[in-house]
Amino acid sequence: MPRLSKTLPSPSMMIALIALTISLGGTSYAAINYPKKSIPRAALQSNAVDSRVLGTNAVRAGNISPNAVTRYRIRPGAVTNSRIASKAVTNSRIASNAVDGSKVKNRSLRAVDFMKGQIPFGPQGLQGLTGAQGERGLQGVQGDEGSIGITGATGAGSQGPTGATGATGSAGATGSAGATGSAGATGATGAQGSDAFDTVDYLQSSLKTANASTSTSYTQDCPGTDRAIGGGFLNNDSTSGISHMSRPTTANGSGPGTEAWTVKLYNNSGSSFTFYVYVICVPPGNTTSNW
């Protein structure tokens, strides 16, 4: 003979059986004959369940269906901390907008119960009294040198007097010679000039004698009106004689001029010597006298 099990049905099975009985037998029977702790949600009137009915820690997360608890199901002030087990009420157990200000006990929330930024700042309070001066701190490490600031605006003052001229500096070194420039273009041929001299006369005096230890002079004239442009002498004794003068003069040799050539010699030896006087003459139209 098979042995009968003594296992009791689960609470959910019991509630299902009671609900089936109520639906078949009518609400009047159920209102009077519900067993203890077996009343389903559909049989409860609004605000029928309060803190006097619920035991301490009686409502747990497993006893509440998702979105089952709304603000219409809870009487104001009915659910307190002592009626809810620790961590029994989670976000998934509370419907949107179910908990408002009337459902929260005054002064029961702390600052840590709010997200950052949810509590607005109050108005700024009055300025507090000035505190006592603190002790002087240690000298800090010198900072890095800052960057050069921008140039300030030019001042509005008038220009000052000109300062004294400074001392002349030393001359600088001579610069290197520049490169030789390129040759310039050949200039145009000038007009042909007139002949310098039509005739040049070269005259030699007769042989002259210079006595010992004396000065001797001789003038060789140009012919006619010719002008002397050069002259000289020839000493036949190269070991004696000193020239005192050799220049163009007047015809008589009395002064500067252009008509003749005068030579004056001094014989410094003990014997006489001979010499010649020369003159170069040109026509007067080709010369200009500055005497």
Image (cartoon, rainbow, N blue to C red):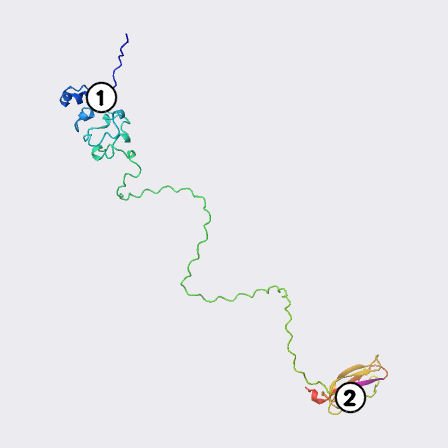
Looking at the image, which residue sits at the far right?
271
Rendered location of residue 157, percent (x, y): 41, 64
Determine whether 103 is above or below 56 in the image: below
Foreground pick, 86 / 133: 86
Q: For numbered disc 1, what is the local secondary structure?
A: helix
Left or right: 57 with respect to 261? left
Determine whether 201 is above or below 85 in the image: below
Q: Is residue 16 visible?
A: yes
- Which residue, given by chain and number where applicable, does mark 1 sit on? 16
Q: Give the main secondary structure of the magenta stretch.
A: strand
Foreground pick, 258 / 255: 258
Q: Residue at x 27, y 25 (%)?
A: 62
Crowding near pointer 2: few (<14 within 10 Å), some, many (20+)? many
Foreground pick, 9 / 278: 9
Quadrant of the image occupied by residue 108: top left
Q: For numbered disc 2, what is the local secondary structure?
A: strand
In the image, the segment drawn in magenta is 273-279
User: The C terminus lies in which quarter of the figure?
Assistant: bottom right
- Per the rendering, the mark at residue 77 is none
Rendered location of residue 29, percent (x, y): 14, 20
Looking at the image, which residue sits at the far left?
28
Identify the amino acid type marked 2. Gln
Rendered location of residue 245, percent (x, y): 76, 83
Question: Magenta stretch: residue 97 in it?
Answer: no
Left or right: 278 with respect to 34? right
Residue contact between numbered discs 2 and 1, judged by CB atoms under 8 Å: no
Identify the amino acid type marked 1. Ala
Quadrant of the image occupied by residue 78: top left
Quadrant of the image occupied by residue 83: top left
Q: Earlier in the sequence, mark 2 or mark 1?
A: 1
- Which residue, given by chain and number where applicable, does mark 2 sit on? 220
